[in-house]
Image (cartoon, rainbow, N blue to C red):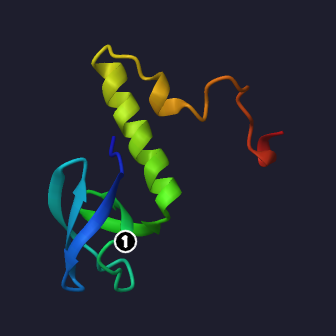
Amino acid sequence: MCLGLPMTIVETDGVSALCRFDGEERRVSVLLLSNPPVGAKVLVYLDNAVRLLDDEEARLIGDALRGLQAAMSGENCDDFFADLIGREPELPEHLR
């Protein structure tokens, strides 16, 4: 299984970009995007930036990944999923 990382572009030459997430840096291809600027948040799969993210979506994905890591370590992960706690799951409109 491949998980996408919400990374921030630190520097770019238009072909590749140095990106950062939680202290990890990696060089990724940005050829699938149209010249994303430094500071842009991108979703990265297998060292390829596949789409731009807004700040809120990047935060939610980052929190989910940190929560998953906490759960796998046996730590309390509730704080990472605060938007899900205390509400009933909702089916997408097309499944109702």
Q: Residue at image x 80%, y 47%?
A: 93
Figure quadrant of residue 42? bottom left
- On screen, 4 above or below 35? above
Relative image position of residue 82 (x, y in whole percent)? 55, 31
- Local SS, label 1: loop
Relative placement, left or right, of 84 versus 74 is right
Relative image position of residue 51 (x, y in whole percent)? 43, 68
Q: Residue at image x 32%, y 13%?
A: 74
- On screen, 64 above or below 29? above
- What residue type is disc 1 on? Ala
Relative placement, left or right, of 26 versus 71 is left
Relative image position of residue 34 (x, y in whole percent)? 39, 85
Q: Residue at image x 32%, y 67%?
A: 49
Q: Quadrant of the C terminus?
A: top right
Nearest to the observer: residue 44 or residue 54? 54
Residue to which mark 1 is pinned: 40
